[in-house]
Image (cartoon, rainbow, N blue to C red):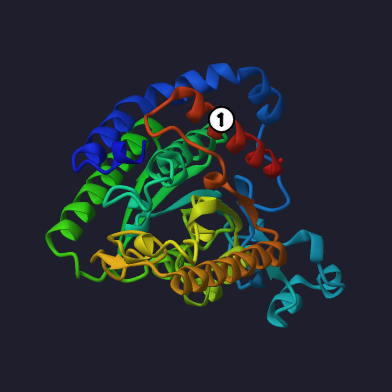
């Protein structure tokens, strides 16, 4: 089955099907879970963790004779005002409540389109490894579509940030259908371009971009809901500071696409010399560094597994310390072909995660 996804056209075929089917699947999933959604999300959003839609008073300042008297803060009138308003104004004791500011929470989806997401589309990792233990593209599309569609139903303003290398692209729209369509098409185009570029120049290095993507979130001023969709295989030291700061400012959901194989790569047996000599373009390695064929000896696999396990523990520690929600998307097994049942499973999990906003 691993050979199914090694074909050069497989990525184009798979992503084309996802782009075409996901909008309809979102509507089908909504009706399939209508009873649960109605019970969970009936009424206006009310949460202590995010800023609900409404108004927010600006910082008060002293009242002057040129200001509108109706804006005086009558809840904090000084004793002097009972005797003489002119004296209270001259002394600066009257406070003015400035014009209110309308604030709205945003739902910001950060989509990591690093080259590591394309694992399985350059070359199968190892012959016995089933494709559903390698492939991450379907769950990536499922998670983005499910969360964005559900967030739109909650009334959030939507923003999607697609990040690749040191480049980000931002999509905003009040229409969830158009936003979702534009997002999945851009994701598909970015992946196909990354695959073509890596095949044309296998030595090409792509910078780790998760830290760069998280820095874009820090520009969101209103406390909002931030979804980060990534395999989190970048070295945790690169992005830990930005993730911690983002999680302290916002309500963060971490959708982890990494499978168990990503962090626990099969270690060749000590007597299996042949498999340790075989050169592969994938395996226990960062695909961002290059996709040149390399052998994968036992020691390299052990070091990789140890480093990824430590990074994973640090990620979960950050999530616990900042009350971020962790969603292990990649831990489940996904079909190598688009399946509505797979999407519905991801949709229901996203629905349960967003219940925490109530």
Please say if 174 is above or below 282: above
What element does badge 1 sit on? helix
Pointer 1: residues within 10 angstroms few (<14), some, or many (20+)? some
Q: Nearer the viewer, residue 42 or 188?
A: 188
Q: Does any portion of residue 16 appear in the rendered image?
A: yes
Camera-nearest residue between 130 and 12: 130
Where residue 290 appears, x then y in whole percent?
Answer: 26, 68
Residue in the foreground of this view, choosing between 66 and 147:
147
Residue 88 appears left or right of 139: right
Q: Residue 36: percent from the left, percent from the top?
A: 67, 23
State the residue at coordinates (65%, 58%): 324
Q: Which residue is mark 1?
A: 345
Write the residue at 60% across / 45% down: 53
Q: Is residue 97 left or right of residue 331?
A: right
Q: Position of residue 101 (x, y in %)?
A: 56, 55
Relative height, residue 28 to residue 172 (above, below): above
Which residue shows up at 19% across the image and 70% down it? 203
- The quadrant of the picture occupied by the C terminus is top right
- The residue most toward the front is 271
Say which of 269 and 136 sits in front.
269
Extreme bottom residue here? 91
Q: Is residue 227 visible?
A: no
Position of residue 232 measured from the top left corner of the image (x, y, whole percent) = 49, 61
**Residue 19 location, quadrant:** top left
Residue at the extreme left? 200
The quarter of the picture where the N terminus appears is: top left
Number of labels in the image equals 1
Rendered image quadrant of residue 22? top left
Q: Quick check: 183 above or below 261?
A: above
């Amino acid at each position: 089955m691993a050979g199914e996804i090694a074909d050069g056209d497989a990525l184009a075929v798979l992503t084309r099907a996802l782009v075409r089917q996901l909008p309809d699947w979102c509507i089908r999933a909504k009706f399939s879970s209508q009873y649960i959604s109605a019970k969970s999300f009936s009424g206006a959003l009310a949460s202590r963790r995010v800023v609900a839609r409404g108004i927010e008073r600006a910082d008060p300042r002293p009242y002057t004779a040129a200001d509108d008297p109706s804006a005086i803060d009558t809840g904090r009138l000084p004793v002097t005002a009972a005797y003489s308003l002119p004296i209270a104004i001259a002394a600066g004791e009257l406070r003015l409540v400035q014009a209110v500011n309308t604030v709205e929470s945003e739902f910001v989806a950060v989509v990591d389109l690093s080259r590591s997401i394309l694992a399985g589309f350059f070359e199968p990792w190892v012959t016995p490894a089933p494709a559903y233990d390698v492939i991450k593209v379907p769950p990536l599309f499922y998670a983005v579509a499910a969360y964005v569609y559900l967030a739109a139903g909650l009334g959030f303003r939507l923003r999607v940030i697609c990040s690749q290398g040191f480049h980000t692209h931002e999509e905003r729209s009040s229409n969830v259908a158009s936003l979702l369509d534009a997002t999945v098409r851009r994701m598909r185009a970015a992946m196909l371009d990354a695959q073509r570029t890596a095949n044309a120049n296998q030595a090409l290095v792509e910078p780790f971009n998760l830290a760069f993507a998280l820095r874009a979130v820090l520009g969101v001023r209103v406390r909002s809901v931030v979804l980060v969709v990534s395999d989190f295989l970048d070295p945790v030291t690169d992005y830990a500071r930005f993730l911690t700061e983002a999680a302290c400012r916002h309500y963060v959901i971490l959708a982890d696409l990494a499978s168990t194989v990503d962090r626990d790569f099969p270690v060749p047996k000590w007597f299996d010399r042949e498999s340790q000599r075989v050169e592969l373009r994938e395996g226990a390695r960062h695909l961002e560094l290059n996709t040149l064929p390399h052998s994968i000896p036992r020691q390299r696999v052990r070091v990789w597994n140890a480093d990824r396990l430590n990074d994973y523990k640090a990620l979960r520690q950050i999530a616990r310390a900042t009350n971020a929600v962790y969603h292990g998307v990649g831990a489940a097994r996904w079909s190598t072909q688009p399946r509505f049942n797979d999407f519905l499973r991801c949709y229901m999990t996203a629905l349960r995660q967003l219940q925490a906003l109530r």
